Amino acid sequence: MVDRPVSAVRTTRARVTIGLAALGVVGAFAWWRLGPSRDAVEAGQVRWLKGQTHAHSNRSGDSDTPPEDVARWYAAHGFDFLIFTDHDTVTSLGRVGPLLTIAGAELTQNLERCRPAEPAAPHCPLHVNALFVDRPASASVPQDGNLERLDRYTAALQKTAALGGLAQINHPNFHYGAANATLLAELSRRGARFVELANEAWDSNNQGDATHPSTEQLWDDALGLGARLFAIASDDAHHYDDAERVRSRGEDVFPGDLGFIVVRARNDPASIRASMEHGDFYASTGVWLETLDRAASTLTLEVRGEARFELIGRGGKVLEQQHGQRAVFALGTIDGYVRVRVTDANGRRAWTQPIWPS
């Protein structure tokens, strides 16, 4: 996929001037059961919630849609919660109709250069989402002239902590800002909680290229180095009801409802945050799991229709495949971690979070 020129970065990913404009490490993966009891659902205690962790409004400067209209759009598309991530701006509206909105911001560092340089990307955009922001403060990352890539990401992690949020490393293959497993593993040790495995914006380069791994392989490589990062699928949307109008003008469109997460939680910010911190969710580009159940030694998944279920281990190796509507994997002794990828007949996918040895 051809990289967008840096001028386009300013006008779509972030309309900011290019230039120099902690959280604790996640512990061992909990024994979880995704799929609450019927009684819990009926009591309004815990249910599966469709959520978005990367979306922009006109407060970003590169979208024309007001936050209230963004929220209404996501509500109309079946979302239960939305975390606003406007560029360097904290946005939250509380509840808009049935939709819960949660405060967040995209900490947007668009550098002319950084070290180490990436030959395939002459500029260095480094973007981190601060999710669940709970403190009023400036959402821009302080600049000090330091061009070291790791240090600039670390500054964003520190800013996220100062805002009371959780850090999500965004689109690692976008201009290859974080397309390095060693870097991701170190960012995990420094407090990053999530990584965008499937940022569904057209220029995120999720598939990689001849010299860069896919974001999924990058995630596996980082997990193999000890990272404790949970995977996110997201929209990075900028266009909503205006998407077709923008497309008709021949402009690039960044639409919504392409990537999302499904979280087992009550429909309130504290519960959603706690579930995400512990990995009680899955990422999806359109596959819905009817069942996701971990017992003492098995993992059971079920979908509507039919799908391919792949149990994946260290290094991205496929350990076992099953086909159909339901799959039951015997976990046995876990070497490093295991996770499951589900692919339906239309090529849409869902990813469970890693399971580490207890």
Image (cartoon, grey):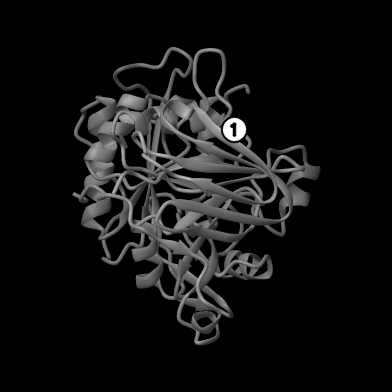
* Mark 1 surroundings: few (<14), some (14-19) or many (≥20) residues within 10 A: some
Instruction: Indicate whether 10 appears above or below 304.
Output: above
Q: Quadrant of residue 122?
A: top left
Q: Residue at x 78, y 50 (%)?
A: 244
Q: Residue at x 35, y 21 (%)?
A: 113
State the image coordinates of residue 56 (x, y, percent, origin top left): 53, 54
Asked which secondary structure carries label 1, the reply is loop
- Viewer-proximal residue among 120 and 122: 120
Going by the numbered disc 1, the residue's amino acid type is Asp
Q: Quadrant of residue 72?
A: bottom right
- Residue lying furthest right in this view? 248
State the image coordinates of residue 320 (x, y, percent, origin top left): 56, 35
State the image coordinates of residue 86 (x, y, percent, origin top left): 45, 54
Q: Quadrant of residue 150?
A: top left
State the image coordinates of residue 254 (x, y, percent, origin top left): 64, 45
What residue is pinned by disc 1?
203
- Viewer-proximal residue among 101 and 328: 328
